[in-house]
Image (tube, rainbow, N blue to C red):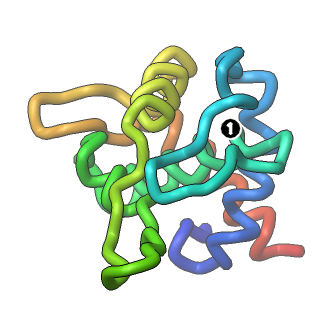
């Protein structure tokens, strides 16, 4: 049986995002907000919410227990400035927090004192997708 470490992250996230569409809700604000202070514009992709949720699920699988703060750093970027040097800016926490809430409703992630961890259903969900990718 294959696991998430054996396949390309981009393929796993793309297919996971497609499978998450019927499982999780999409917030109404997602088309209008930037994903962090370091970004110039809101995401162009209509599937941004599902891609980010699938990516967060993968990060919880690999690095769990993990919290919003750690993922804000993970999804941050370098902000360009005119006068002084570029520096890292953390991503917005609202999108990550709302993704965690939706993943918890779908029973793929659960909350503990140390942070969010993946549930057996979430582990099975990602392992099945990774084994399908490995076979293809």
Q: Is residue 132 above or below residue 102?
A: below
Q: How many marks on residues? A: 1
Residue 47 location in percent, x, y? Answer: 81, 42
The extreme bottom residue here reads: 85
Q: Residue at 70%, 29% (x, y): give it.
A: 32
Q: Residue at 51%, 39% (x, y): give it.
A: 122
Q: Residue at 45%, 37% (x, y): give it.
A: 96
In the foreground, 5 or 51: 51
Residue 52 location in percent, x, y? Answer: 61, 47
Residue 3 lies left or right of residue 60; in this view the side is right
Q: Quadrant of the N terminus?
A: bottom right
Residue 46 lies left or right of residue 100; in this view the side is right
- Image-quadrant location for residue 86: bottom left
- Where is mark 1, residue-wise? 49
- Image-quadrant location for residue 85: bottom left
Q: Is residue 57 above or below residue 113?
A: below
Label 1 SS: helix
Residue 19 location in percent, x, y? Answer: 79, 39
Q: Is residue 47 above or below residue 11?
A: above
Residue 113 location in percent, x, y? Answer: 10, 30
- Mark 1 is surrounded, within 10 Å at the Cα level, by few (under 14), some (14 to 19) or many (20 or more) other residues, namely many
- Image-quadrant location for residue 59: bottom left
Residue 121 lies left or right of residue 94; in this view the side is right
In the foreground, 27 or 58: 27
Q: Residue at 18%, 29% (x, y): give it.
A: 112
């Amino acid at each position: 049986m294959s696991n998430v470490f054996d396949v390309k992250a981009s393929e796993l996230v793309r297919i996971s995002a497609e499978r998450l569409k019927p499982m999780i809700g999409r917030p109404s604000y997602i088309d209008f907000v930037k994903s962090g202070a370091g970004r110039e514009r809101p995401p162009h992709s209509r599937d941004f919410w599902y891609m980010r949720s699938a990516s967060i699920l993968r990060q919880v699988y690999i690095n769990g227990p993990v919290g919003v703060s750690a993922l804000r750093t993970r999804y941050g970027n370098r902000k360009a400035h005119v006068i002084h040097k570029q520096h890292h800016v953390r991503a917005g926490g609202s999108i990550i927090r709302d993704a965690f809430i939706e993943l918890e409703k779908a029973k793929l992630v659960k909350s503990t004192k140390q942070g969010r961890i993946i549930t057996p259903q979430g582990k099975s969900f990602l392992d099945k997708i990774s084994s399908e990718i490995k076979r293809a």
